[in-house]
Amino acid sequence: QNEASELLQKLNTRRPEGGNLAHYDDSWHIVKENDSVPPSAKWSDCSVERSMSEYANHADLGARAWMSHSVIPFDYRVVEVPRGNLLDPSCDAMILGHLPRGSEERWLAEHRPQRRLIVIDETVYKLYGDRVRAYFESRKVQHEILVLPMVEENKSME
């Protein structure tokens, strides 16, 4: 039994082929080729690839995008949009930003009616609700806004 535990520990601490995520210091880290990682780190065979966001502009060249690849089929993409541009009706990030530019999937989405469910907390809704609604209306996106009370008592990891 002790040998099995040691073997499992070795498997969990060895960098897997293709994975670049390690858990240590109570957080997941994207690990680059020559980064130092504590020996106690737990490795994942999942990966995250960073790139420049196509929404970067002259005011914010540092905006990035991330593509997450997991073992179970649950890939997703995150893009940064320069400050002040997200709710600008000329910016399509909230409609199409999850789809890479030039992809067939994005081309198809650009040519079909879109619909969205927007989940937003009460405070953000009070501050930006009118602008969020105006954004989706101006882009002719069928949408529904679900406002949730997100006070500390309601927050949980479960």
Image: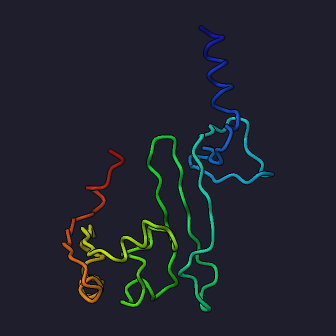
For the C terminus, the image quarter is top left
Numbered disc total: 0
The picture places residue 140, in percent across and down from the top left corner, at 24, 84
Q: Residue furthest top?
A: 1
Q: Colour scheme used in the picture?
A: rainbow
* 134 to 70, vertically: above or below: below
* Residue found 30% across the figure and 76% down from its top: 124
User: Which image quadrant for residue 32?
Assistant: bottom right
* Residue found 40% across the figure and 74% down from its top: 96
* 100 to 152, vertically: above or below: below
Q: Is residue 15 left or right of residue 154?
A: right
The picture places residue 72, in percent across and down from the top left corner, at 46, 41
* 90 to 44, vertically: above or below: below
Looking at the picture, tell me which residue is in the foreground, 109 or 58.
109
The picture places residue 122, in percent across and down from the top left corner, at 24, 72
* Residue found 59% across the figure and 8% down from its top: 1
Q: Is residue 108 left or right of residue 65?
A: left
Q: Is residue 34 left or right of residue 79?
A: right
The picture places residue 152, in percent across and down from the top left corner, at 31, 59
